[in-house]
Amino acid sequence: MTNGVAIRRSGDGRRPVEKCTEFFDVGVHQVHAANPGAAPRAPQPEPLAEPRLEPEELTILMSWAEAIAEVLASAPERLHHTLSEAQTGGTWRAELDIPEPSATLSQTIDALPRLLTHPTPPRLEPPLEQALAGVNDPPPGAGEHEILARRALRSALEQRRTPHQKLGLSLARRHPPGER
């Protein structure tokens, strides 16, 4: 990739100005001929396994996934509280006169805590990294709600991790019992 100073010109008679930047990006990819006997294969589309959510419901799911990612990055000791607030039947919804989510959204949100349950004791690595490693590949036989929850959570965790890495910030760590 290269860049340089560009000249901005206008069609109305104003003088050109040299205060713009132009970028060029060039890529080279080698192409090989196919074997004479090889038949082209059309890509097989994957069947859509995830449940259908309305745009508003997807926004709610992503908001909870982002809240979980933020808690894991900055205050992992608050994770259980955040997960309990996300579950259906929370008192805060009634207090704010917010209707309960649809059945499909509820089942997808209820899958989020199961994705963060680890059978082994938590390691001392950043909890966000541990959670990200746990949501990469769905296990065989995962339900459609778990697959959608997994995708939403993985996206939120990756988005939360990226700025920390770029800025050189450290992620919150779990502390062993009795240490603080």
Image (spheres, helix red, strand yellow):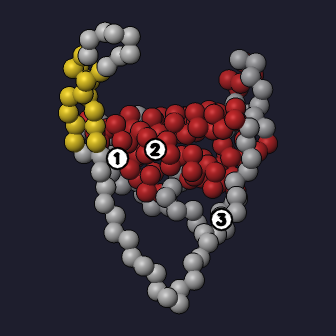
With respect to residue 31, does 138 lie above or below? above
Label for residue 157? 2
On the rendered image, what quadrant is the N terminus found in?
top left
Within 10 Å of disc 1 (Cα), the crowding (few <14, some 14-19, many 20+) is: some
With respect to residue 110, does 5 lie above or below? above
Front of the two marks 3 and 2: 3
Q: CA distance from mark 1 to mark 3?
A: 36 Å
Contact flag, marks 1 and 3 (Cβ < 8 Å)? no
Q: Assign a secondary structure to mark 2.
A: helix
Residue 4 spot, x, y in % from top left:
20, 33
* Residue at x 72%, y 18% (from the top left corner): 95
Front of the two marks 1 and 3: 3
Within 10 Å of disc 3 (Cα), the crowding (few <14, some 14-19, many 20+) is: few
- Earlier residue among tags 1 and 3: 3
* Residue at x 69%, y 54% (from the top left corner): 50
* Residue at x 46%, y 86% (from the top left corner): 35
With respect to residue 18, does 128 lie above or below? below
Q: Which residue is mark 3?
A: 45
Q: Nearer the viewer, residue 60 or 5?
A: 5
Q: Assign a secondary structure to mark 1.
A: loop
Q: In which quarter of the view is residue 163 placed?
A: top left
* Residue at x 34%, y 64% (from the top left corner): 29
Q: Which residue is mark 1?
A: 126
Kind of residue at badge 1: Pro
Kind of residue at badge 3: Pro
Is 78 placed left or right of 112 in the picture? left
Kind of residue at badge 2: Leu
- Earlier residue among tags 1 and 2: 1
Residue 21 spot, x, y in % from top left:
26, 28
